[in-house]
Amino acid sequence: MPHLDLPGAELAYETTGRASAPALLLIPAGIATLRMWDEHVEALASEHLVVRYDPRAFGGTRHDEAEPFWNHRDAIALLDHLGIAQATVVGASRGGAIAIDVALHAPDRVAGLVAVSARIGGHPEVPLDAATQARFDEVEAIDPAVDAARMLRLETELFAAGVGRVADELDPAFLARARELALPNVAHALDDGDMRPLEPAAAGRLDTIGVPSLVMVGELDFAPFLAQFETLAATLPDATAHRLTGTAHLPSVERPEEFSRLLLAWLDEHGL
């Protein structure tokens, strides 16, 4: 796997497709790696140059914990390295927050925005119900220095299941895939590093993102993500919104065929 040398980091990335084709930049969720897009790359690469990477503290990327960094700047640095003038940026969860920040930080480099179960920098906190909060408290009580693998496994199962389901009720193949995607991040459980936020935060500036946007969320996702989905759908000037039934925080993994169909149709509709 190739790596891009940056100050304090070696950014792991992959490219698939023709260099002359319209570019897609795929950014994974915080409980996954760039491998979360495996099921979609072949279909996307038929008409696009597909670029995917692991942000710092995830997957195959190595970084120096003492070196300050900005995730949105890393994404632009990767586009620069590959000679890509403009891309449609696709991000899931934490990767969705990075995608939104890229669109705000460098609007001339972004042709379209896709935010899946996305976080929004600076969004007001939305409380969880008591039962769900108790489930998160159980995960957060685990010391990653003692048992990072268990902590990440339980966190992944929680996000995969969402509201109204438990891990044992999920399709075994999907649950196994979710666990597999999270496993490489065990090695990074203690190395978040000195991450700096976009300033001003995204929440107050969403209405300035002028490119076509696609926002998606699983109907069984947690209340904060449903609220942020509604904020994006209502505030982005040119937004198309989809709730995916029967899935939670990882719709692109749990419902890959439906996700690819929606994404490809939207890209075609907007000439991206």
Image (cartoon, helix red, strand yellow):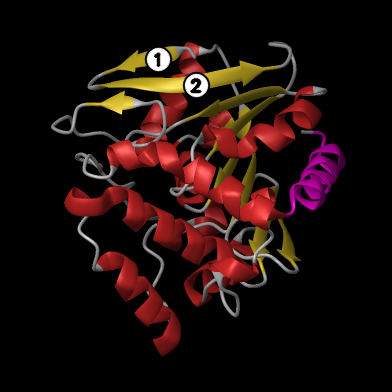
> Is residue 268 located in the magenta-colored stretch of the structure?
yes
| Residue 251 appears in view | no
What residue type is disc 2 on?
Tyr
What secondary structure do most residues of the magenta stretch adopt? helix
| Residue nearest the viewer, comparing 87 with 249 | 249
Residue 87 figure quarter: top right
Point out the stretch of residues depicted in magenta. Answer: 255-271
Report the side of 169 relative to 137 (left or right).
Answer: right
State the image coordinates of residue 54 (x, y, percent, origin top left): 45, 31
State the image coordinates of residue 224 (x, y, percent, origin top left): 48, 72
State the image coordinates of residue 17 (x, y, percent, origin top left): 72, 16
Residue 71 figure quarter: top left
Q: Secondary structure at mark 2?
A: strand
Question: Would you say the residues marked 2 and 1 are in contact, meaning their CB atoms lie under 8 Å apart?
Answer: yes
Residue 4: image tag: 1
Report the side of 155 relative to 43 (left or right).
Answer: left
Residue at x-position 57% and y-position 77%: 163
Residue 61 figure quarter: top left
Residue at x-position 62% and y-position 65%: 248
Circle 2 is placed at which residue position? Answer: 13
| Residue nearest the viewer, comparing 254 with 79 | 254
> Is residue 18 located in the magenta-colored stretch of the structure?
no
